[in-house]
Amino acid sequence: MSDDGPHRKRIGFLSFGHWSRGQGSRTQTGADALKQSVELAVAAQEIGIDGAFFRVHHFARQLASPFPLLAAIGTATSRIEIGTGVIDMRYENPLYMAEDAAAADLLGGERLQLGISRGSPEPALHGSEAFGYVPGEGETDADVARQHTQLFRAAISGAPLVQADANMAGGIGRLAIQPLSATLPERIWWGAGTRKTGVWTAEQGMNLMSSTLLTEDTGVPFDQLQAEQIELYLDAWREAGWERRPRISVSRSVMPIVSDIDNAYFGREAGGGDTVGYLDGGLARFGKTYAGEPDRIAADAAVALADTILLTVPNQLGVDYNADLLRNVAEHVAPAIGWSPATSDV
């Protein structure tokens, strides 16, 4: 891992891992999406980018089972952080996930940065219930997600969870899951969609992962609303008395237009602003795409407060195009927000 310290400004990419056989798609199958994800992570590390993050969706032509992918990237790279943004905890078996996460983390030299949350709207109706996780009476699926999270975090921390079988040799006391990765508990992030959830995240001692949308709207620009969420999170973190310094990420769509092909793909998005719409039955504010001359993101209030910026990439345009996009961000955009390439590998 880089020796620049844990809180230098970092930049990573965030891929949704879409695939389709549509015209122009260079990611036609699930196998393409997985293999290209590894290839892009390798390219990003060579460029000096700090992180490779992946969105998890179920019942869709997108990446769904993160740990085989994270383990593959961990063995193909040496420095880059490897993460999720986010895993939907409604779907997860907490103990099996704890074993998978620890194994993938150890294979990669303890570089996982796991973003988890209640999840987002999805194409499946009651999809997590099909996985066997049905809310109890008076509970919501959000309650299920938080219960799974609590057990998962206890498991990766080495809590003794299951009584040993006295009939087995040495069977006394209680057992923890194995293997364990000692530092993984400090590398769990919660994807918070509101200011209130940001405060809850701090109270739980998790890092904050904030996206390109918030499921609330107060009329102020998106970056200012997100900056308010971050400030409230930091206040709550200090009030909770946690000793370590937390990490904070925000996601942005940044499309530097430096070539004719960039202009063909994204030129029409230049100069756009925030949008407001309905999501999950309420108002939501969506952040704008930074397309065009690549100096506008430096004025983003939330970017200034976060230590990690995740850049959403159009993965179906292929590895070569996205590597060029990341290279252009590193050269033309990142220095304006205080970023410089990592200086050393493990």
Image (cartoon, rainbow, N blue to C red):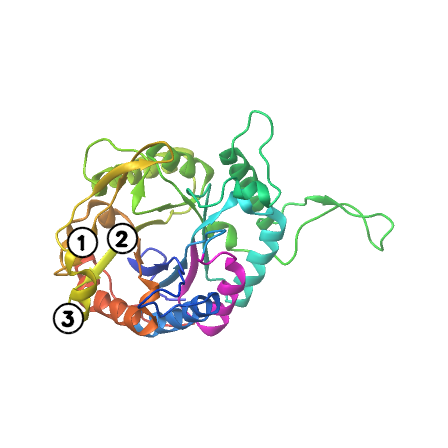
Which of the two marks, 3 or 1, is nearer to us in this view?
3
Amino acid type, label 1:
Ile
Q: Mark 3 and mark 1: span between their CA atoms?
A: 21 Å
Residue extent of the magenta highlight: 61-84
Disc 3 designates what residue? 260
Task: Establish if 114 lies above or below 43.
Answer: above
Front position in the image: 83 or 286 = 286
Q: Secondary structure at mark 1?
A: helix
Q: Quadrant of residue 61?
A: bottom left
State yes or no: discs 2 and 1 in contact (Cβ < 8 Å). Answer: yes
x%, y% of residue 62? 44, 57
Amino acid type, label 3:
Asp
The answer to whether residue 156 is left or right of residue 245 is: right
Mark 3 or mark 1, earlier in chain: 3
Q: Quadrant of residue 311?
A: bottom left
x%, y% of residue 195? 33, 34
Disc 1 designates what residue? 297
Mark 2 or mark 3, earlier in chain: 2
Task: Say whether residue 69 is magenta.
Answer: yes
Disc 2 designates what residue? 252
The answer to whether residue 189 is left or right of residue 290 is: right
Characterize the local packing of mark 1: few (<14), some (14-19) or many (20 or more) Cα atoms within 10 angstroms: many
Q: Split into 4 quadrants, where in the image is the N terminus?
A: bottom left
State yes or no: discs 2 and 3 in contact (Cβ < 8 Å). Answer: no
Which of the two marks, 2 or 3, is nearer to us in this view?
3
Q: Quadrant of residue 214?
A: top left
x%, y% of residue 173? 76, 45
